[in-house]
Image (tube, rainbow, N blue to C red):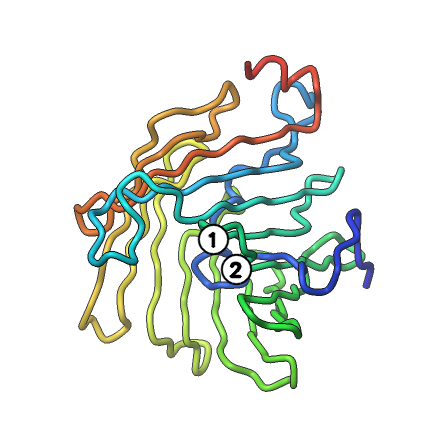
Amino acid sequence: MVYRNYITLPLIALAVIGSQSAIAEPQSDRSSAENPCENPKIVGVSKTLFNLKAPEDEDSPSIGDITRTENEVYGPDGRRLRVEWRDADGAVSLAFMELYDDSDLPYGAFYVESGELNPNLEKFEWSEDGKVKTVTYSQPDGKVTSRSKFFLGAEGREIERRYGLKDDDTFSSSDTVEYLGKNEVSYTWSRADGSRSSKVVYDIEETDSFGNWTRRKVSRNGIETQREVRTLTYSSSVCAQDMK
């Protein structure tokens, strides 16, 4: 196993996508090609989330207020190394660091959430064809808390996510994901017993010159909840100039 640590972090700032919903997203945007200027690798992502829903009480953010910022750092080989979330006050709410094996497949991650001093662990297991990833979540003391399974499509993007696995065929809930071009445009969450479901739709408002979204509106069950704005940094400075 090779631990590719391109950026040294203190333990409290370990980063990766520690919540199940967060794990899913930016993989679909990362690209690689022989010509780095036509399809360069992403080496950094900075995202800001703004509230669009009317506050339910005085302590809730006002419409248009920042609710969270997210930053991702990638290595020179295009692998995502860490993710950090900060709340509206700037405090770290989630930090995560991803680990890779000798074949450059991610095999796990450490992450900490608000107020935690010791990192939790995610362990990844892959199917032989590389299309199914099983994630086991455990606490610092090694106690397993839950398991999830992620199914990848032909382009290596997640098309289904199953949560609360009891065995390979039994789970508590799942997401099905839809894409348009490079971008995720919606996902539908449902309980396995069919008792409840919801749909999140991403309305892509702006993209950069490489087709990756830079501004989108988020709706849940037809109600607009937030707007997300992000900046992507690419591996080639020449390509970065093309984006301006």
Q: Is residue 38 positioned above or below 106 on the image?
A: above
Q: Going 59% across and 72% down the picture, which residue do you hit?
A: 116
Q: Identity of the amino acid at label 1?
A: Asp
| Residue 53 relative to residue 77: left or right | left
Any mark on residue 93, and which? Answer: 2
Residue 67, x across and y down, in percent: 39, 48
Residue 160, x across and y down, in percent: 40, 57
Q: Identity of the amino acid at label 2?
A: Ser
Viewport quadrant of the C terminus: top right
Name the residue at the front extreme: 58
* Corner quadrant of residue 186: top left
In terms of secondary structure, where does tag 2 sit?
A: strand
Q: CA distance from mark 2 to mark 1?
A: 6 Å
Any mark on residue 49, and which? Answer: none
Q: Are marks 2 and 1 in contact (CB under 8 Å)?
A: yes
Any mark on residue 87, and which? Answer: 1
Which mark sits nearer the N-terminus, 2 or 1? 1
Residue 182, x across and y down, in percent: 46, 33
In terms of secondary structure, where does tag 1 sit?
A: strand
Q: Nearer the viewer, residue 235 or 9?
A: 9
